[in-house]
Image: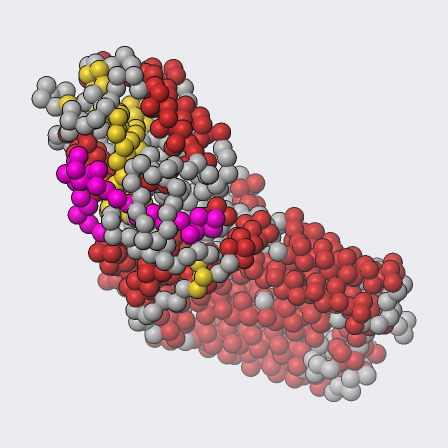
Amino acid sequence: MPADRDIVVITGSSGFFGSGLIKRFAGDFAIAGFDQAALPRPPPEAECICINLTSVASLDAAFARLRFAYGNRLSSVIHLAAYFDLTGRPNAKYEEVTVRGTERLLNGLQGFEVEQFVFASSMLVHRARRPGEQINEDWPLESDLPYRASKIAAEKVIHERRGAVPAVIIRPSGVYDDVSRNSFLAQQIARIYERQLASHVYPGNLDSGQSYLHLDDLTDAVKRIVERRRQLPAEVAFLLGEPDVLSFGELQKLLGRLIHDQAWETRKIPKELARVGAWVEDSVLGEEAFVRPWMIDIADDHYALDITRARSLLGWEPQRSLRETLPRIVAALKADPVAWYRANRLDWAIVADRTTAAPRAPEEMAGHVHMGVIDHGDMAMTDHRRTAATDHPQMPIADHMAAMPSMERALPWSRYLVIAFGLWLIASPWLFGLFDASAAGTVRDVTQERGLWAPPLRNALTGWSDIASGLLLVVLGALSLSRRFAWAPWGSTVVGLWLLLAPLLFWTASAAAYLNDTIVGALAIAFSVVVPMMPGMSHEGMMDPSTVPPGWTYSPSSWLQRIPIIVLASIGFVIAINLSAYQLGYLATIWDPFFAGGDGKNGTEFIVTSTVSKAWPIADGGLGAIAYLIEALMGAMGTADRWRTMPWMVTFFFILVVPLGGVSIFFIIIQPIVIGTYCSLCLLAAAAMLVMIPLALDEVVATGQYMLRSWRTGRPLLVTFFAGGPDPLASNNGSDPGFTAPIPRQLSAAVRGVVIPWTLALSCVLGAWLMFSRAIFATTGAAANNDHLIGALIITVAITAMAEVARPLRFVNCLLSLWLIGAPWTVGGASAAAGWNEAIAGVLVLALSLPRGRLGGNRYGSWDRYIA
């Protein structure tokens, strides 16, 4: 250590305040930073000496290192380390860290020549005043909150245990800098920026407010304290803050004007209402709310400071004001919302869609941030859920364009396969005897009642369709070999879709022809647009290797994410094609071990030949098979970045799975109401469809976010929708474990974004109970049908809400539960016991649908705000 530099020890040296002090003192003092062993470290201008304030042995070791490196004389020890949490509840750490930790520190310093001990307390130790009144250092203290009480107790310890060591107590106001970094101020700004409903209400006097203090002014005051240590009284306290106090209402108006250029209306609400809202948010809904009951209790507190003592003894006066700094804070927010949110330890994923620049680390934005030691001016809470995006290099477009021909030539076999499928189709009508009237077979009863054409004609029409389709596949497959005909693969896809539908339209009497057209149609689609490079994709999008949407913790389009959907769609396809085979007359009977129908048929046979089924001009089981097959094929399309490279496909996939799937599930739900029985295979297919819905929703959200970001940058919406594109904010963080990972990790990754909270699981149990309650309570008529329908809908909503992105959907069950509670008085046909069963089930479902339930720790960018 240079002989001409005094030594200053700073505890909590990696914090917001501590780091600022080190930067201010660097060059004038030698600095030792006492801090925890965990990251982050103090700035490099200070030597980091690891301590644990709760351990005497740890402090003894730190003091031994201090004495060895710097000697026995210490110019100043600035004690910032303390404990704070937002709960407002008592915690043993307040006593152990803030109070006893200060005592241990003072005891250890007795063996040194300490010229000054500076303790960072808070202006909040004083009793609040009313607007228009100021607080000075002699104003009474008030220990009604654990944080305040711990600071007051620590001040008392210093008074009693400092011995000959001169002591200075600083009581700063809320500390901020040019990007805020004050948790309460940042939360207030963020609420207005996001236009939250809570930003328009306040449970206190709008004329009350508190003093703030810029970090630069605070560090200047402390430096003056250290420099004048020999002139100051042996024990003195200083209130440090800006005399200009913005009231809460004034601050709201100023922020509204700066952020949105509009008047921001704020209404006062009763404290009781605010407490109820906070309790509901925290205890009922299970949300991690920032506003706590204790904050509501002190909403009327006013803290305006009289800094006469600091002026006279230190010659200090703040050179900045929050009023003048707010435009810079808001400008930083608008320039880069992601970086601003990260710097303030807010969920930056929420604003990922509002920036055009790649997210920067908070230290790149302004200075160094600490997450550990927290004081009134350093309430930057850790957000353990945030993620960091990484830069991703892109291939130059010229290189990409030059590589395109070779990439296309790498898969010519897929085009030749399409040609081969066409040749097979041309020959297949003769192989399956579609033009042989004697081979058409007889008409089964299941189709005879529909009044269809004669089987030979239906087979012949199918045959001619196969020949025409085969010729088209040959021609289109050949054209696809040339880059000039980029549309040709889409033509082959249309032919494949026709092949899936044609046997149903013609009601072909040949099971072999039906199966053949289905298989060839699926393969034609697969080898036209699934296996090869998708035609029409944006070159910039293909060059971008990023796979994880901004603010997300994983790619919702990864193969592991899609395999469960493909498997479930395949199960649904197998079930539906069996139903279709019965409806087309290929099977004499179909399996159903549980339910009976009428006319000598089991439940499945009765339902697929009912008047509801016959209302369709074609076999509705076949339509279901086509839908499931297309879902499986679309599930296999693209790579882990398809949420941005193929928005059209994700959208159509969503339409197939969610709206159309929901409609099909609803029709299956009402089967016993309309037709009078169940269909085992239909229920199994519906279950597969229902499970697919929560698994598919996250990808839809990511695509919607990407479309919005792209539109905000000025890119045409239709171009983005059909061609996709790059995303400079996305990352490639390698969170997908891949198929080489252990099976448990693969299984966990396959269902990311879907969590089964016990509340929703129990809602499903109650829904099932309602569905079967007719058998238990002998309920009939409208009451029985009501229980069945509402129970099934509760299950559907609960399972869908297991997707974290769809968690707010659980509130629909609140409406269903209210209907259940009132059903005994509005729906007839129920006994008293059945009525009480409905009411009790309704109350339970209501209670279970309010909490948000467990989340899996994943993030969803700007969608996080909706996971309420």
Magenta-span inclusion, residue 318: yes
Q: Nearer the viewer, residue 376 or 791?
A: 376
* Magenta-drawn stretch, dominant element (helix, strand or loop): loop
Q: What residue range appears in magenta?
A: 296-321
Q: Nearer the viewer, residue 709 or 157?
A: 157
Q: In this rendering, would 413 be left or right of 828?
A: left
Pinpoint residue 728: horizontal percent, then vertical percent: 31, 58
Q: Residue at x 79, y 61 (%)?
A: 838
Q: From what the image shows, is residue 837 above or below residue 93?
A: below
Pinpoint residue 301: horizontal percent, then vertical percent: 40, 49
Q: Residue at x 56, y 51 (%)?
A: 279
Q: Quadrant of residue 840?
A: bottom right
Q: Residue at x 81, y 59 (%)?
A: 837
Q: In this rendering, would 228 be left or right of 351?
A: left
Pinpoint residue 850: horizontal percent, then vertical percent: 62, 56
Q: Quadrant of residue 693?
A: bottom right
Q: Is residue 523 visible?
A: no
Q: From what the image shows, is residue 310 above or below residue 851?
A: above
Q: In the rendered view of the protein, which quadrant contains the N terminus?
A: top left
Pinpoint residue 809: horizontal percent, then vertical percent: 59, 62
